[in-house]
Image (spheres, rainbow, N blue to C red):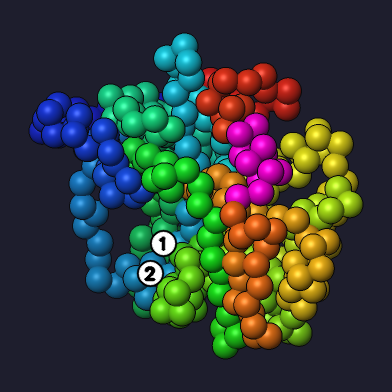
């Protein structure tokens, strides 16, 4: 599919842009352009275009506003030492978007079209690449039901868009260990629900428990399983790994209530490369506390595209608080983070073919 190129009549002035990309923070600044592709049940995907980023005009009966038929993705473009641009495993994001689409009764987008849309916006808005050390261009592809109707059924019309945001390091000064609150009253996902789909509704449901975590003085909330309220699932937007003194690492299995992170999948591979034993198995909140207190558990890390790999230092659970290791960043966490970032930024060999040069 050809992308129509629509010239921006009034892009952000160079000086304003230079200021914005010097210290963009996370998710505050957006580039000049966006990709839009339309879908109609009778026509399929059509009218791919890249043009000015601008407000959308939606009918008030637009299906997404009422029944939340929406899915999204998140991936970063990196600048390599030779000045070129690269994406990290974009086809995995494309495949995951289609898995999310299946759960939300939405149409698939061809994987190559998804990746091409990402490529188009990175190249179009290359001048928006952050100048801050460790910066990248965060891409947000998303799809929503755009048909105007109030009956409950899958929509017949959708829009797929990609917007881009220059981002600095998620954490400003190094990688502090985060403090975590175990949600007691709320769950994120139930068996048979939408926990494995990247859909806005999961986030909407996580805002109250996340606010509760902040109110209790923590950074993030961790969710337990909905049935027994005992097995650790994930944070609101990051997967978890537990590293033990005997050299094994555990991460909760993908049983349908956990989001299958690209970072999670990549870390499993990097851990195997290190010769460590990684097990995808259930791990309970009680065991977590016991292992932290006995010293058998050395580290806990949270991972996702935005913050990469982040150490968990403290946990407040139903039976009280406990500290992981020294409470600060652990060795394996730091090593994995460096290895992954070096591959993404083209500073280390890419033995698994994860990097796609643009
Ligand atoms: C996106 C997301 C993750 C992390 O996935 P990555 O592909 O590693 O960025 C983890 N949990 C939830 C709920 C998410 O939405």
Question: What is the total number of numbered labels drawn onto the structure image?
Answer: 2
Q: Which residue is mark 2?
A: 63
Question: Residue 20, image x and y in percent?
Answer: 22, 37
Circle 1 — which element?
strand
State which quarter of the image contains the N terminus.
top left
Circle 1 packing at 10 Å, graded few (<14), some (14-19), many (20+), is many
Asked whether disc 1 touches disc 2, contact meaning CB atoms under 8 Å apart, the reply is yes
Circle 2 — which element?
helix
Question: Residue 332, image x and y in percent?
Answer: 71, 43
| Ligand 1 lies under 8 Å from the Cβ of mark 2 | no
* Looking at the image, residue 298 lies above or below residue 288: above
Farthest residue to the front: give it.
326
* Looking at the image, residue 122 lies above or below residue 181: above
Question: Residue 3, image x and y in percent?
Answer: 36, 29
Residue 252, image quadrant: bottom right
Farthest residue to the bottom: give it.
185
Determine whether, in the image, residue 11 is placed left or right of residue 297.
left
Pick the residue in front: 88 or 296: 296
Q: Residue at x 65, y 57 (%)?
A: 326
| Secondary structure character of the magenta stretch overall | helix
Residue 214, image quadrant: bottom left
Q: Which residues are magenta?
A: 329-339
Residue 321, image quadrant: bottom right
Circle 2 packing at 10 Å, graded few (<14), some (14-19), many (20+), is many
Magenta stretch: residue 334 in it?
A: yes
Q: Which residue is mark 1?
A: 145
Pick the residue in front: 313 or 85: 313
Whether residue 197 is visible here, answered yes or no, is no
Q: Residue at x 12, y 28 (%)?
A: 15
Whether residue 211 is visible here, answered yes or no, is yes
Pick the residue in front: 87 or 108: 87
């Amino acid at each position: 599919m050809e992308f129509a190129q629509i010239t921006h009549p009034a892009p952000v002035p160079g000086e304003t842009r230079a200021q914005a990309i010097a210290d963009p923070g996370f998710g505050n600044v957006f580039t000049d352009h966006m990709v839009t592709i339309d879908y109609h049940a009778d026509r399929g995907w059509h009218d791919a275009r890249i043009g000015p980023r601008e407000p959308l005009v939606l009918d008030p009966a637009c299906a997404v506003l009422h029944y939340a038929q929406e899915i999204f993705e998140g991936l970063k473009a990196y600048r390599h030492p030779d000045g070129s641009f690269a994406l990290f495993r974009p086809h995995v994001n494309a495949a995951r978007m289609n898995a999310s689409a299946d759960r939300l009764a939405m149409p698939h987008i061809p994987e190559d079209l998804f990746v091409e849309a990402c490529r188009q916006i990175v190249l179009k808005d290359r001048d928006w690449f952050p100048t801050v050390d460790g910066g990248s261009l965060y891409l947000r592809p998303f799809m929503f039901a755009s048909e105007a109707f109030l009956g409950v059924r899958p929509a017949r019309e959708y829009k797929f868009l990609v917007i881009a945001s220059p981002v600095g390091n998620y954490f400003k000064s190094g990688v502090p260990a985060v403090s975590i609150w175990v949600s007691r009253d709320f769950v994120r996902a139930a068996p048979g629900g939408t926990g494995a789909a990247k859909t806005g509704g999961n986030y909407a449901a996580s805002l109250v428990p996340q606010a509760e975590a902040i109110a209790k003085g923590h950074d993030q909330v961790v969710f337990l399983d909905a049935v027994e309220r005992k097995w650790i699932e994930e944070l609101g937007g990051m997967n978890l790994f537990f590293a033990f003194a005997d050299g094994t690492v555990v991460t909760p299995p993908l049983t349908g209530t956990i989001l299958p992170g690209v970072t999670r999948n990549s870390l499993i591979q990097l851990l195997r490369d290190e010769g460590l034993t990684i097990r995808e198995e259930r791990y309970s909140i009680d065991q977590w506390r016991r292992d932290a207190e006995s010293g058998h558990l050395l580290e806990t890390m949270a991972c996702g595209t935005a913050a990469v790999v982040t150490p968990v230092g403290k946990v407040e659970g139903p039976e009280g608080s406990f500290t992981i290791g020294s409470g600060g960043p652990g060795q394996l966490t730091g090593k994995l983070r460096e290895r992954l970032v070096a591959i993404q930024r083209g500073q280390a060999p890419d033995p698994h073919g994860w990097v796609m040069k643009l």
